[in-house]
Amino acid sequence: MGNKRELIDSLKAFFKAAFDFKENSRQSIKKEAYDEMDNFMLLCFGDLLGIPVPTSYYTLELLPYLAEDLEGWERRIMARESIYGDRWGDFCC
């Protein structure tokens, strides 16, 4: 009886994962969008975190357009253990 219940639960989990494209894809796309925005903001305003960026003088022109996103970006970046490791850790050994 226990095996049948486990089989039914496994099948339910399989079909839910296989056919629940909308929620899974929405989360994936949202995470990728945040990651891309974080990378862009890091390239533009990395000097706010202590990373020297030689083009920071020119990217200050973007500040009025990105000012409302700056606080959330700083919180997300500072919450990471490693700025480089979280993003590029997937591609390493």
Image: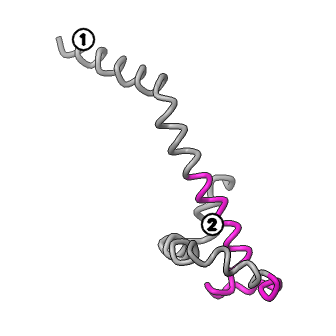
Relative to 39, is 54 above or below? below
Residue 88 in view in this figure: no
Residue 57: x percent and y percent? 80, 88
Of badges 2 and 1, nearer the viewer stands 2
Residue 6: x percent and y percent? 27, 19
Q: Quadrant of residue 50?
A: bottom right
Residue 38: x percent and y percent? 63, 66
Relative to 68, is 10 above or below? above
Question: Residue at left 29%, top 21%?
Answer: 9
Q: Does residue 9 show up magenta in the picture?
A: no
Which residue is identified by label 1? 4
Packing grade of label 2 (10 A; few <14, some 14-19, many >=20) is many
Residue found at the far left of this picture: 1
Residue 30: x percent and y percent? 55, 50
Nearest the camera: 58 or 43?
A: 58
Q: Does residue 52 show up magenta in the picture?
A: yes
Residue 51 in view in this figure: yes
Which residue is identified by label 2? 38
Q: What stretch is highlighted in magenta?
A: 31-58
Nearest the camera: 23 or 80?
A: 23
Question: Residue at left 54%, top 77%?
Answer: 74
Amino acid at dot 1:
Lys
Amino acid at dot 2:
Asp
Question: Residue at left 71%, top 67%?
Answer: 40
Q: What element carries label 2?
A: helix
